[in-house]
Image (tube, coloured by chain):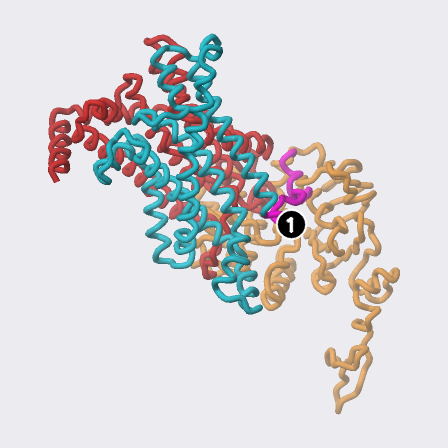
């Protein structure tokens, strides 16, 4: 019981002193920028692969190999290759590399899942390839793109937490510092905040997915009773990415 | 490079330890997830509950879970049990979802015909549903194996030695090659086990081998060129 | 008028879908391409709006070789109705119908108004305009598809087995709609089907194809029924099984027509 009150006290103090806000700010700074850059890279490539159908094997291969990449190790690797001043850039590079595969998979599979006849019809009524991409494929593929972004973001958040190991700030700092010093309230407090942050981001993406589904009907018949849908075995393997490291 | 020459004997013990640390969570995760996934598939009510819970657990960053479990379970921070339990939680969370999807992927018509032929519920599970759910279960298992192996490395921050040791040691001693070795070995371990699972899958699930890819109607795909 | 001159199509995987196909499709008439699967009829159709380009030969529309026309522009001038309607699932009915006008730059309000008019033309209740395709029945979706094809008032309407996916009652309804539309609008319609009865019902010119796009017989429905060119045609139109051979039988004051099995097929009306 004591631990709980101590932890709450710690959280309260550190919010009041602004320190936790700073840490959250650092965490979000790294996360948001990395995901943006990763999306800027991965979405066009994913759309290109999805629209033309070429390079599919590369996309699947990248997504598969990426899951085997230990994110903590990648971050430390890139950071160890550069001097102290370029550490943040190296860290950003690591975060971007970690987010790209999930977003790529989301972008590409979103397009791939669209009924071919819909795209054929769009072409037949005289849409240009660009119009097909923006007016038909992108909206219909949005659901899977969002889930790819979600996986990528959570992956980055988890890794950014570890950025404290190389003194880049973030919420992991209090955890990593507190463990050897046996400051239980600190460790628990910071951990709880990290978890809440991750859950919050996940919930935001959940809302986004819900909104996308409401605004963009995907053409599945609404009148017929829902049969249990088969899960394409590829999907579980492609979009889920480990958030832990 | 020098580092490797001087330290290669460190590799094997850490590799084996890493493997050992990964196996228990994977096995327990798989074994627990099957009934959980089946329940989630079978009963609408439990489905929402279980999958939401699984999804939430999976969202938790690993270092945070390593930090939160000890006070909850009365363990010291720097203990292997801590890491093992955390990894098991991740494995169960990830695998349950796959298991639910796997059971859902079994053709309802096949299930019905099995019942019509006279299989009892229990028999039907072992003889029909589980094997037919196999391919998707395998896909999920592969994901779990690969991600567990990657996650074990974070355990080094709570004193659990694995290939992750090369990360932190190399980082502190500023030997990029050591870190690189750690990364490569971790990935190699994951990919080798993944490959083994694929081979195992082909042996155990021969009917699921991919047939020649169905030719997309040439009539439909021509238009893109114009 | 649409003219095919020695058109062949060999696909990338080696299939020779169409070989040396030549045909004149007269304007303001319904020409039906009929044959079983693999006869190349859909390929021939899709060459008119350049969804497929021939490997050899020429296709001319009103004297202009279409290989010189920019495909996207060409498609915006030709109506295309496919099986399963091919509606954009994330757009409302009214937006689906207005797709091509909007693509050609017609202002939204104007395009929407035209769309509503077209809904009247194809027999759809205007209250369905704001719905999404997946909220409509199959027959309604097909009507939307036809309306969309007519939206820019094209001279040519291509229809690829448009009624294949709906049930017989709805199909019969839709066929009658096409006949009515054609009486009012007199478009050049090229219609693909594997159903010979549909071909005879709708076609002014019926072109019977076999594998490779080879024309086995072409002519009016009456000509084909009266003189099937060979056994293949006879089998296809059901003449060999006596479906088409009717005999008379007087019942009271009326003359009843019986098919070859003695089942009543109709009554002679003067």
Q: Position of residue A214 (x, y in %)?
A: 38, 48
Q: Is C206 displayed left or right of B206 in the figure?
A: right
Q: Which residues are magenta?
A: B205-226
Does residue B218 show up magenta in the picture?
Answer: yes
**Mark 1 burial class by Cα count in 10 Å: few <14, some 14-19, many 20+:** many
Q: Is B39 displayed left or right of B206 in the figure?
A: left
The colour assigned to chain B within the rendered structure: cyan
Asked which quadrant contains residue A24, the reply is top left
Asked which quadrant contains residue B14, the reply is top left
Q: Residue at x 19, y 32 (%)?
A: A189
Asked which quadrant contains residue B164, the reply is top left
Q: Is residue A143 above or below residue A73?
A: below
Q: Residue at x 62, y 47 (%)?
A: B206
Q: Position of residue C190 (x, y in %)?
A: 70, 51
Q: Looking at the picture, tell me which residue is in the foreground, C80 or B78.
A: B78
Does residue B202 show up magenta in the picture?
Answer: no
The colour assigned to chain A within the rendered structure: red
């Amino acid at each position: 019981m004591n631990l709980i009150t101590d932890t709450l006290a710690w959280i309260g103090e550190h919010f009041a002193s602004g320190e936790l806000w700073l840490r959250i700010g650092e965490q979000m700074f790294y996360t948001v920028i990395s995901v943006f850059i990763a999306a800027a890279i991965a979405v066009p490539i994913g759309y290109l692969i999805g629209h033309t159908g070429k390079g599919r094997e590369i996309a699947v291969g990248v997504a598969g190999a990426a899951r085997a990449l230990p994110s903590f190790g990648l971050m430390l690797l890139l950071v160890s290759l550069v001097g102290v001043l370029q550490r943040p850039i190296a860290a950003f590079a690591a975060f971007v590399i970690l987010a790209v595969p999930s977003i790529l998979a989301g972008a590409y599979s979103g397009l791939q899942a669209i009924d071919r006849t819909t795209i054929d019809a769009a072409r037949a009524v005289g849409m240009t390839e660009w119009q097909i991409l923006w007016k038909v494929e992108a909206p219909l593929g949005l659901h899977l793109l969002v889930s790819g972004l979600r996986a990528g973001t959570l992956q980055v958040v988890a890794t950014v937490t570890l950025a404290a190991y190389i003194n880049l700030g973030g919420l992991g700092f209090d955890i990593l510092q507190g463990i050897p010093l046996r400051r239980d309230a600190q460790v628990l407090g910071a951990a709880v905040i990290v978890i809440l942050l991750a859950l919050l981001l996940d919930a935001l993406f959940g809302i986004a997915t819900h909104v996308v589904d409401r605004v963009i009907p995907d053409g599945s018949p609404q009148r017929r009773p829902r049969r249990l849908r088969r899960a394409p075995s590829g999907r579980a393997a492609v979009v889920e990415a480990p958030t832990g490291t | 490079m020098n580092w490797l020459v001087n330290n290669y004997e460190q590799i094997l013990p850490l590799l084996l330890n890493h493997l050992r640390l990964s196996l228990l969570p994977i096995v327990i995760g798989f074994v627990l997830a099957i009934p959980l996934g089946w329940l989630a598939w079978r009963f609408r009510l439990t489905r929402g509950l279980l999958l939401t819970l699984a999804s939430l657990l999976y969202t938790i960053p690993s270092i945070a879970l390593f930090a939160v479990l000890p006070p909850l379970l009365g363990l010291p921070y720097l203990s292997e049990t801590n890491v093992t339990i955390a990894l098991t939680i991740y494995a169960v969370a990830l695998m349950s979802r796959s298991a639910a999807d796997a059971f859902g992927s079994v053709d309802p018509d096949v299930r019905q015909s099995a019942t019509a032929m006279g299989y009892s519920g229990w028999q039907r599970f072992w003889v029909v549903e589980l094997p037919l759910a196999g391919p998707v279960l395998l896909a999920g298992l592969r994901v779990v194996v690969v991600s567990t192996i990657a996650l074990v490395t974070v355990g080094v921050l709570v004193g659990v030695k694995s290939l992750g040791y090369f990360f932190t040691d190399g980082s502190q001693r500023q030997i990029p090659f050591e870190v690189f070795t750690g990364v490569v070995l971790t990935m190699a371990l994951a990919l080798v086990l993944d490959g083994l699972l694929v081979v195992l899958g082909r042996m155990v699930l021969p009917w699921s081998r991919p047939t020649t890819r169905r030719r997309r109607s040439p009539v439909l795909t021509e238009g893109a060129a114009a | 008028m649409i003219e095919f001159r020695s058109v062949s199509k060999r696909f990338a995987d080696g299939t020779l879908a169409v070989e040396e196909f030549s045909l004149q499709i007269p304007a303001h008439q319904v020409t039906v391409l009929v044959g079983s699967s693999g006869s190349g009829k859909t390929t021939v159709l899709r060459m008119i709006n350049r969804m497929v380009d021939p490997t050899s030969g020429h296709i001319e529309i009103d004297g202009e070789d279409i290989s010189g026309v920019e495909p996207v522009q060409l498609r915006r001038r030709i109506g295309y109705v496919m099986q399963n309607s091919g509606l954009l699932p994330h757009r409302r009915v009214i937006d689906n119908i207005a797709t091509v006008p909007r693509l050609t730059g017609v202002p939204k309000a104007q395009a929407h108004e035209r769309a509503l008019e077209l809904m009247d033309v194809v027999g759809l209740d205007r209250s369905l305009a704001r719905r999404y395709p997946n909220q409509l029945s199959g027959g309604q979706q097909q009507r939307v598809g036809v309306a969309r094809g007519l939206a820019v008032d094209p001279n040519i309407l291509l229809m690829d087995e448009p009624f294949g996916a709906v049930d017989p009652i709805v199909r019969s309804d839709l066929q009658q709609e096409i006949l009515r539309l054609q009486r009012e609008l007199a478009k050049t319609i090229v219609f693909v089907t594997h159903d010979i009865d549909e071909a005879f019902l709708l076609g002014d010119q019926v072109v019977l194809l076999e594998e490779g796009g080879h024309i086995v017989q072409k002519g009016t429905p009456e000509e084909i029924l009266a003189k099937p060119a060979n056994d293949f045609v006879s089998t296809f139109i059901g003449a060999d099984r006596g479906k088409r051979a009717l005999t008379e039988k007087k019942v009271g004051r009326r003359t009843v027509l019986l098919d070859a099995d003695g089942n009543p097929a109709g009554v002679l009306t003067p």
